[in-house]
Amino acid sequence: MTWIDAVARLRGERRAAVLVTLAAVRGHAPREAGAKMVVAADEIYETIGGGNLEMVAVNRAREMLNESVRTPELLELRLNDKAPAKYGRQCCGGEVSILLEPLAQAHTVAIFGVGHVGLELARILSRHDLDLMLSDSRPEFLDALPVLEPAVARIHAEVAVLGEEAISRLPAGTDVLIMTHDHAEDLHLCDAALRHPQLGSIGLIGSKAKWQRFIKKLGELGHDRATIERIQCPIGIPEVAGKQPATIAVSVAAELLARRAPTAA
């Protein structure tokens, strides 16, 4: 399997990996500059030359995976008999620079309710590199989704009369946004989201008064207060306030994207 195929496969399987590239070669080395390989937790695809050179890169790549490092790193190695070599000597005589680039895992955002706000939010998120799950119990509301093309996101649309089933199938780490036309449907979706143990964030559109009613109803459904507080309501950042659908969508998208942005070292 080529490194390009490996990247596509691992991304599709939502598995983390590091792309390793011989960024520069000075003198003699086992491979030319530009050679690449992909390192996953248990697999290696292609090679940058084998020996100590490759094992140092592989070990560092797996350390990066274990530590959830998200920024690229550059390694400098000398290939001579005087250089430190934990995994065997390489006496090619050259020097290499190795670039290690963590590959972002495909992140999933699920929007339940593609009404006025949901569609505006989908417009914004469709311009980002993620899996965008769009669900509505009203088939006609999914007819508007062609306006999202061409999209950067991989869009998956589903008519879900029972949105609870759709939530149960979401991959771990999914950020869920609940904004249907029906408060009863919202409540069922909140209940289902709280029963999914591995979701990322859970957001519910609505006022503080709506949320107080939901706290009471979710408690009656058997959820304790700590579990209920996994849900954020209202959603969006206070710096962007307003009641227009496009304004609400900007506020919610900004909050979501800020949460997913890499933190500065």
Image (tube, rainbow, N blue to C red):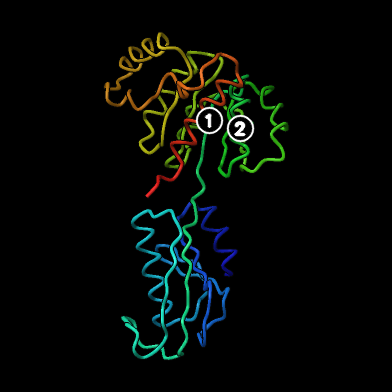
* Residue under pointer 2: 124
Q: Position of residue 262 (x, y in %)?
A: 43, 45
Q: Quadrant of residue 229?
A: top left
Name the residue: 50% across, 85% down.
29
Q: Quadrant of residue 31?
A: bottom right
In the figure, is residue 111 to the left or right of 192? right
Q: How many marks?
A: 2
Name the residue: 36% across, 69% down.
59
Callout 2, which amino acid?
Ile
Is tag 1's residue or tag 2's residue first in the polypeptide sequence?
A: 2
- Is label 1 in a helix, a strand or a loop? helix
Quadrant housing the N terminus: bottom right
- Is label 2 in a helix, a strand or a loop? helix
Callout 1, which amino acid?
Ala
Q: Position of residue 179 (x, y in %)?
A: 52, 21
Q: Is residue 53 above or below residue 6?
A: below
Which residue occupies the foreground of this view, 66 or 158? 66
* Residue under pointer 1: 253
